[in-house]
Image: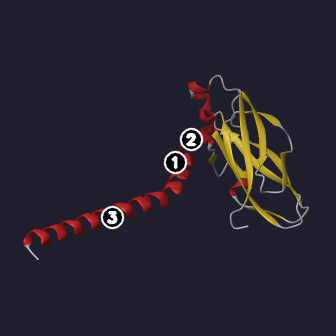
Amino acid sequence: MNSYAAAHKTNNRKTLMVLLVILGLMIGLVAASVPLYRLFCQVTGYGGTTQKVEAGSTTILAREMTIRFNSDVNSALPWYFKPVQRSVTVKIGEEALIFYRAVNNSNETITGTATFNVTPFKAAPYFNKIDCFCFTEQTLAPGEEVDMPVSFFIDPDLATDKRLDEVKEITLSYTFFRAEED
């Protein structure tokens, strides 16, 4: 083998190694993209993602907000799922407790998981959940009916955000899906 062929073979190996490293990095980014996106949404409220907190606010303002509740169920999940009340009016910083009702309309035990968002999206960073059925999967026996709680408050910092001066209503929306491992 001449020196040209040997150099060409070495260059091909280097190119192959670089391409394999790039491919490995791309696969790693794809695998990490969902958890990183979820973390980004939780931190920033992007896409209507609410905040999870340990305790309520110590400051309650006079400004009131109407919180509306919405519910949807994916067609693969044979559940009835609706808010017990359609809306509440709360003062900013005031803790509220509301319930959604779920009924398993099938003859099998099914586990479901809920996704959620807040609209308008720009209000999401100020919507704080203390406790929510959406933090864990829910398992319902055939015909079982449960009331599932959501404890929340609107962060008083919302009142200092000029982009939200016109916001008088926030909608909290849930969609239930059959859990992946069910």
Mark 1 and mark 2 in contact? Answer it, CB < 8 Å.
yes
Q: Nearer the viewer, residue 3 or 73?
A: 3
Q: What element carries label 2?
A: helix
- If you read the primary sequence from the N terminus, does the residue marked by circle 1 or circle 2 appear first? 1
Quarter of the image with the C terminus is bottom right
The residue carrying pointer 3 sits among few (fewer than 14), some (14 to 19) or many (20 or more) residues within 10 Å by Cα, namely: few
Residue carrying label 2: 46
User: Which amino acid does the dot numbered 3 rest on?
Assistant: Val
Q: Where is residue 34 in the image (x, y as percent from the top left)?
A: 53, 55
Does residue 150 appear to the left or right of 12 in the view shown? right
> What label does residue 21 carry, if any?
3
Q: As drawn, which residue projects farthest toward the bottom?
A: 1
Q: Distance between the residues labelled 3 and 1?
A: 26 Å
Q: How many labels does the image show?
A: 3
Relative placement, left or right, of 10 versus 173 is left
Q: Residue furthest top?
A: 166
Q: Residue at x 65, y 22 (%)?
A: 166
Give amino acid for label 2.
Answer: Tyr
Observer-side mark, 3 or 1, equals: 3
Q: How far from the left and from the top, in percent, is residue 175?
A: 73, 48
Indicate the secondary structure of the residue bearing disc 1.
Answer: helix
How far apart, in angstroms, are the residues tagged by discs 1 and 2? 7 Å
Which quarter of the picture shows residue 164?
top right
Q: Residue 40 carries which label?
A: 1
One can see residue 134 in this view: yes
Query: What residue is at 70 percent from the left and 41 percent from the top?
Result: 153
Image coordinates of residue 76 in percent, x first then y, are 77, 56
